[in-house]
Image: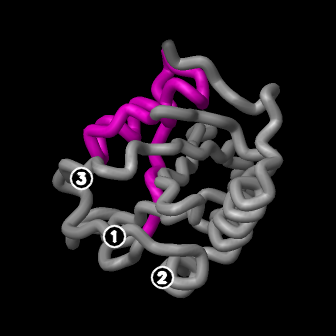
Amino acid sequence: MHEKKLIDLYPYRLTQNTPEFLLLKRSKGHVYHGQWRMVGGKVKADETYWQAALRELKEETSFIPVKFWTIPGVNHFYEHKTDTIHSIPAFAAELSSDQIPILDDEHTDFGWFELDEALNKIIWPEQKRLLALINQLLTSDQILEDWIVSID
């Protein structure tokens, strides 16, 4: 069986140096319908994980980030239906503060949320952990140069 490769991407903007996370509400008829989530998706055969994350961001929101970086952590979970343990690379994308997303058909709504409200909206514990990690790295200015992906 061929294991699917997945990515998680956490878009954010800085408002008066406070991170606000962009969450998208999943449409009916799509996996995770009704849930508030970050950007996610599958890696295509000809893509790296980071390329897939950028593509998914553009497809789901029409955004191109001003800063794009790898998060020093991964989303781990077990999927019982396929008996698969997933280790999903996670990325963060800083967006311009004045941008408004153009949603694809997988989503019905969006919102910008500071950490506490974002943590209340997200259901998955690993995604909550990664959101808190991103917030801590942003507010303490601890993003290492090695994590930044050049997308020019």
Describe the element under mark 2 as helix, strand or loop.
helix
Distance between mark 3 and mark 1 Cα atoms: 10 Å
**Around disc 3, counting alpha carbons within 10 Å, would you say few (fewer than 14), some (14 to 19), or many (20 or more)?**
few
Describe the element under mark 3 as helix, strand or loop.
loop
Q: Quadrant of residue 85?
A: bottom right
Q: Is residue 66 left or right of residue 33?
A: right
At label 1, which amino acid type do we have? Gly
Q: Looking at the rendering, in which quadrant would you find the N terminus?
A: top right
Describe the element under mark 1 as helix, strand or loop.
strand
Up the image or down, 111 lies above or below 83; here it is: below
Up the image or down, 99 lies above or below 65; here it is: below
The percent coordinates of residue 112 (x first, y second) are 39, 68
Residue bearing the label numbered 1: 111
At label 2, which amino acid type do we have? Lys
The percent coordinates of residue 36 (x first, y second) are 40, 73
Cβ atoms under marks 1 and 2 closer than 8 Å: yes
Return the disc, 3 or 1, that comes first in the chain's sequence.
3
Which residue occupies 43% across, 44% down?
95
Q: Is residue 18 left or right of residue 35?
A: right
Determine which of the numbered discs, if any, sits on residue 121 in the image. Answer: 2
The residue segment tinted magenta is 37-65
Which residue occupies 35% across, 64% down?
24
Q: Is residue 102 visible?
A: yes
The percent coordinates of residue 75 (x first, y second) are 71, 57
Q: Is 41 within the magenta?
A: yes
Return the disc, 1 or 2, that comes first in the chain's sequence.
1
Residue bearing the label numbered 3: 100
Q: Quadrant of residue 120?
A: bottom right
Q: Is residue 77 visible?
A: no
Q: Is residue 69 left or right of residue 63?
A: right
Up the image or down, 16 lies above or below 1; here it is: below
